[in-house]
Amino acid sequence: MILDEDDYLAHYGTPRHSGRYPWGSGGDNNLQTSTRSQDWLGYYHDLKGQGLSDTDIARGMGISTTQLRARRSIANAERTAALNAQITRLRAAGNSNVEIGRRLGINESVVRSMTKRFEENKEDVIQSTANMLKEQVGEKNLIDIGSGVENYIGVSPTRLNTAVTVLREKGYQVHDLNIEQVGTGQFTRYKILAAPGTSRTDVFKRRFEVQQINMKSDDYGNNYDGIQPPLVISPNRVAIRYAEDGGKTADGVIHVRPGVSDVSLGNSTYAQVRVSVGPGHYLKGMAVYKDDLPPGVDLVFNTNKSDTGNKFDAMKKIESDDPLNPYGATIRDQVYVRDAEGKKKLTSVMNIVNQEGSWSDWSKEISTQMLSKQSPVLIRSQLNMTLESRQKEFAELSALTNPTVKRKLLETFGDETDSAAVHLDAAGFKRQGWHAILPLDTIPPTQIYAPNFRDGENVVLIRYPHGGTFEIPELTVNNNHKEGRLSLGDHAKDAVGIHHTVAEKLSGADFDGDTVLVIPNNGLKKIRTSPTLEGLKTFDPKATYAPYDGMKTIDGGKWNAAKKEVEYGVDGDGNPIKPKKQMKQTQMGIVSNLITDMTIRQAPMSDVVRAVKHSMVVIDAEKHNLNWKQSALDNNIAQLQEKYQFQYGGTRGASTLISRATAKVMVDERKERRAAKGGSIDKGTGQRVFEPTGRKNKDGSLAQQKSKRLAETDDAHTLSSGTPQERLYADHSNKLKVLANQARLEAVHTPNLKYSPSAKKTYAEEVVSLNDKLDAARRNRPLERQAQIFANAQIHAKRQENPNMDDTTLKKVRSQALNEARIRTGAKRQDIKITKEEWNAIQAGAISDSKLREILNKADLDVVRKHATPQKQRLMTDTRIERAKQMLASGYTQAEVADQMGVSISTLKVGLSGEVSE
């Protein structure tokens, strides 16, 4: 049943979906939704209510009336599907039709008619689910149907089990299997669906081939869809701007013709994308709209490569045979619409890796890599700010009244503070933010287009890895720059425009998604900068250390000069050799630590130049296949290590607290002390307590595990070489460790929560909502199981390649395999975001202690902290938000609007996103 337009629900909305058009709700409503923005249909009806005709609305949207009617039909179908889901969930919770209608703000007759359709359609839904499972087995052979799969694909456990029964009656096999977890030695039980005739022995032999279902349903099983195979653009519509034509100054940028639907970026002004071009190639870079493209061309790719006469030489080859994702990168979004039946239909070739707004959520702290190279005065100031902030948070958490929440937050705070004592990151600077960089041809090298900052103020840019103050450009914000406003717009969420020469100062940054930390540096100019070192001004790592034929690359391949590509060949058994992606990170860590130690120990700039040159080669060695080993020889890196670093066994290594703090050390394998022996926290000191596992390796030696050097040290001063910077950091680390123990001591003496049955009835709706969110968070279980299978398969292969692998190397292989597998499967924590109303239910005792502990283990603790320790903030009212929107529409930047409103940029963004004060 699709609602007629006469049944339009003025304030109905659903959570935001991926894709081009956001859904939401407007005005006052009774729905459980966190957004206040109207969905497309609500926007359309608002305009109709103002007396506008379809022709007027279409003209204002820049589309035809035919397209308007099509969008209206699609939006109507989307709204109905979402309403179906809401009604089904509320009925499953035992609510009557009248109660459902009251909660959703619709007539009981609408609920009744839709419910009747659900009942009539039940058999079709079961068959639809059975057909989907059958197709998945046909495609993947063995699929996981164990605990959590029903949550992941979007059906009830009963519906999934019934669909599996339908297939079992047709001969399909279900086998239970225990598969060892990576790194823990424990086993996970899998429930596997296989084709008719597949024995349990067959499944065990092929256990590493078990795959996860990649289809999902947002209408409780009526329809299933997943990631769509990418659309392909014709090479005739793609032009290459080579180095000699100016492409070098915008290396990695994809210019996009605006107004062309099949190259649209959806709601974004810019995005990091992958685009399939013709047979077997793709573009990788930052896409941004540009008006003056050559006739007949819709995409222009900028590259630092020269013209070979074959445009495909400037592109990436598709190496994967995965039809859904041939790029090897995580595709977070595609641009699509849904038809009248709710089916997803791609409308653009853009496969989005990071879209506008993705970068602004990154860490707001300052790493030791940058701060330790500044003055002791600035170091002391930021570290004191960090400690004071944590002390304030500890006091607030200690005053909480909900014991379960208090205990959880204090334990988490203690562990986070311990981690901070090891990693030594400091509080960030006011109004700093991560931004993607894009090139502007006409902006002066001394200026930056940065609409999130104040026009005319000075800002500094930091890129990691960070060599020193000579890699920090200081620029003046010019938000009136014409090209910047045309290219990025007035309201770019997290991008800035700079001259290409500024990127060169940032240790040779590219424009294919590289990011910088932008920090205001007005008044006293606390952050020190210095001119580019003479030895670096003309240094071009790509030209100086270009690959030669047969050269071994940093990831283990060989450069083929004739083909201009890396070849990896096969091993002794004829299996393809895979790139060693970890080598670049290892080498980058080595040279970064060297530069840090040299700077802190006041090495002469002539020596620093050599190390920085090598770091510039290493950072691009994988991307551009540079001869990094020759760079190490030419710059005599071994001599610098001997001069400025300590001897560890047969190699040189980190010599200052800053570089030694997070260095890996091996300790005897241990686990948290059991409750029977007193628990994992010492009730007298608050310290974490461990006990040895006693597990032994095959050779009889005790098994070991990795830790960090500073985590194993009671006094940070023992790792210092005695410089003023190190003394500041050592004092700071020791104070944080004391604070962490105090927090855990408070937690361990906090009693349990008292459950209130009457509160559960009072807050019945919130209890249902919290249970639903917990259910959704459990959906990660099948993804984690799939990651375990992939990781085990990789570990198994590596052990066959190297039967004599030592335990230390095996642990490293296990860790890397599991990390890669989790990225591949998308296994990640699904955080529960607790609303204000749900928080009130928790505070009233409507959730049991055990259930609340599970919710908190899966919750967004930043949100929990905000509820538990509310701060007085100057937020945006509805009136001020409307005023802000008017100013933005008039051409003011976000920084200018925030100043006019007397709020921060972040508060403005929160207000515009729909989270407003009452």
Image (tube, rainbow, N blue to C red):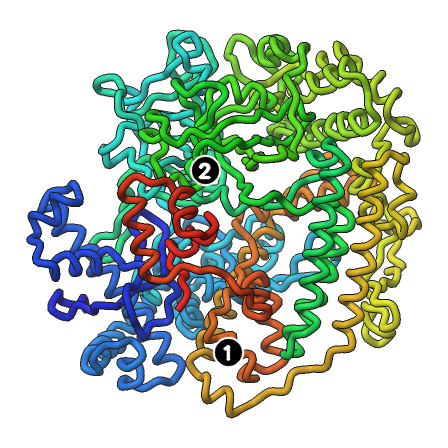
Determine the residue positioned at 20% across, 77% down. 110
Circle on res. 454: 2
Q: Secondary structure at mark 1?
A: helix
Is 716 left or right of 391, judged from the image as shown?
A: right
Determine the residue positioned at 12% across, 59% down. 50
Q: Nearer the viewer, residue 72 or 432?
A: 432
How many other residues sit within 10 Å of disc 2, few (<14), some (14-19) or many (≥20)?
Answer: many
Residue 222 screen position, x and y as percent? 30, 64
Which residue position is annotated with label 1? 840
Which of the 4 image quarters holds residue 802? top right
Q: Nearer the viewer, residue 570 or 398?
A: 398
Farthest-out residue, bottom: 758
Q: Secondary structure at mark 2?
A: loop
Residue 127 screen position, x and y as percent? 32, 66
Inspect this view and state whether residue 495 appears: yes
Determine the residue positioned at 35% across, 37% down. 490
* Amino acid on which the number 2 mark rests in the picture: Arg
